[in-house]
Amino acid sequence: MCGIVGYIGYRDAYPILIKGLQRLEYRGYDSAGVALFDGNNINLAKTKGKVEDLSKKAKTDISLKGTLGIGHTRWATHGVPNDVNSHPHYSNSGDLVIIHNGIIENYESIKKELGKRGYTFSSDTDTEVLVNLIEEVQKTEDVKLGKAVQIALNQVVGAYAIAVFDRKKPDEIVVAKLGSPLAIGVGDKEFFIASDASPFIEFTNNAVYLEDEEMAIVRLGKEIKLRKIKDDAIAYPNILELQLNLEEIEKGGYDHFMLKEIYEQPRAILDTYRGRLLADQGIIRMAGIDDHLEKFLNANRIIIVACGTSWHAGLVAEYIFEDLARIPVEVEYASEFRYRNPVITDKDVLIAISQSGETADTLAAIKLAKERGAFVFGVCNVVGSSIARETDAGAYTHAGPEIGVASTKAFTTQITVLTLIALKLAKEKGEFSSSKFHEFLTELETIPAKVERALQSDELIKVIADVYKDSNNCLYLGRGYNFPVALEGALKLKEISYIHAEGYPAAEMKHGPIALIDEQMPVIVIATKKGHYEKVVSNIQEIKSRKGQIIAIVTEGDEQVRNLADHVVEVPETLESLTPLLTTIPLQLLSYHIAVMRDCNVDQPRNLAKSVTVE
Ligand code: G6P
């Protein structure tokens, strides 16, 4: 978490840094800061709050001159969010200044040592300890900044993406990475540094993504030099040409990124299967699977690891893989899997699902599975992300940048990719006749238009949101394929509107949650025609007889549930295993509208961050 940005070149650094930080706010937004070098001095402004607060403060407090600078937007790990704990941090001499995304785990012992040598600390952060350690190395070893950073980093345990510069040598920024992402944008006589490419996309399409345990000295007028932090070996920068464009990372007329991203789903799903799903030829082409087909076909089981919304996509995938491809699947929270000494063999295939491709727990789970011999496959959205690089093979979702912290289009595109994989394996294993396979492929091709139709309930959902916006609790029920959708619906509501919500398998309700039901309790029930419809109708009756308020998600034309429910939202009919792609849409819209009506910060909910690069 935390976003970092830096610039060195010939333009004014300040506007680049501020705009860059705004684009990185999805990574954390409890405080922000910038440091600029004006030719003689470092001018530093930082504050608790958003980048907007920083920009007001910087304008009044400091000179905004300078063509070299760094900036930071924070999601607090060590030390509460306040002005002092915000980044950048100075070293004691005031010559070095640093920004950091990550955690230095052994900072306490280093702090103690530095304290004995006379260093003082104004903040509670691990980062201030790191910059002073670099300064101490610089002094005692009499080395240049790059070398000092390297020596210091060999003494720390933890994760970092850092950028640091020295007032006495203002023609370079030293950057390093372990566990947190760091990209360098390579322009003509200028360089950009950032947690992802969004801050510099209008200036250059060329970027170098640092690998773990690499560092670089980004020096004006010079080519980038990469080094391995551990053994000083030279690494050669791989300059990638980015596909990202500016429109994709702007709101495009929508009030919030989340709403834009909800509405982008027809396009995102289409982009995700485009070129892979060839219905007329009756094939699914996915290089990541085609090249490793035997691994999948011979697998004893598939283990899926993920966090948050991606974990919910994993649960949907469990239904799809087992139902269609008849392959046993286990779905695990990456954070549990990594620490519970799981049994993994070289006959297992592990699928890691991650929008950002940077989630620390998911990365750790991948490393563990690889060590124990499993074949590891990634489903990521962010191209070139750590998980995409760490896995043996993978398939990207082509959702485009997702900026709203609450995940929407990433979820439906993850399900799309996983469905393609399951269908392909089902076909290869002979579980499907050609005609059944063809039926699935052609139906999948109709999904973007059906999502479009589901989006047309937006106004109706707004009316429903208005009725329930002041609720304190909310229950989401679904069965089969729509049980994970119920979990995801509840998560969306919690995340952005701060209403307590629980997702439950509809039939489990009678083992607990039914005790909560009274006339104050809205219950959202997914009751589409295919998949245990009659059973869900019985569950609805149980709720009704306890006076619960029912909002039902039903198949177009449904009459039975309409007669029972207080509100009904229709989605088009599709195959049972594809229903999550449609039933998710009204739940996303409901959370969105409730959050807006409650005046919540939809795109940046409190305490959350989009990319969780710490444990
Ligand atoms: C955070 C985000 C969620 C996301 C989860 C996993 O909690 O706020 O929206 O689902 O991380 O992220 P990933 O990038 O691995 O999918």
Image (cartoon, helix red, strand yellow):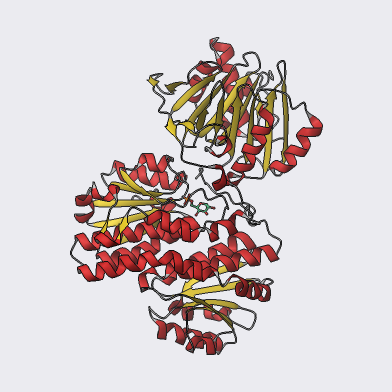
Q: Residue furthest top?
A: 142
Q: Give the x, y percent position of residue 421.
A: 30, 57
Q: Give the x, y percent position of residue 417.
A: 37, 56
Residue at 32% x, 67% y: name it.
Answer: 442
Q: In which quadrant is the N terminus drawn? A: top right
Q: Residue furthest right?
A: 60
Q: Give the x, y percent position of residue 514.
A: 53, 80
The residue nearer to you, when weighing 544 against 274, is 274
The residue nearer to you, when weighing 463 against 274, is 274
In the image, residue 71 sits, relative to residue 290, either above or below, namely: above
The residue nearer to you, when weighing 57 against 200, is 200
In the image, residue 123 sits, relative to residue 559, either above or below, namely: above
Residue at 78% x, 28% y: name it.
Answer: 62
Give the total of numbered labels: 0
The residue nearer to you, when weighing 228 against 283, is 283
**Residue 335, visible in the rendered structure:** yes
Residue at 65% x, 63% y: name it.
Answer: 595
In the image, residue 142 sits, relative to residue 102, either above or below, namely: above
**Residue 212, visible in the rendered structure:** no
Q: Give the x, y percent position of residue 228.
A: 41, 23
In the image, residue 288 sits, relative to residue 467, either above or below, namely: above
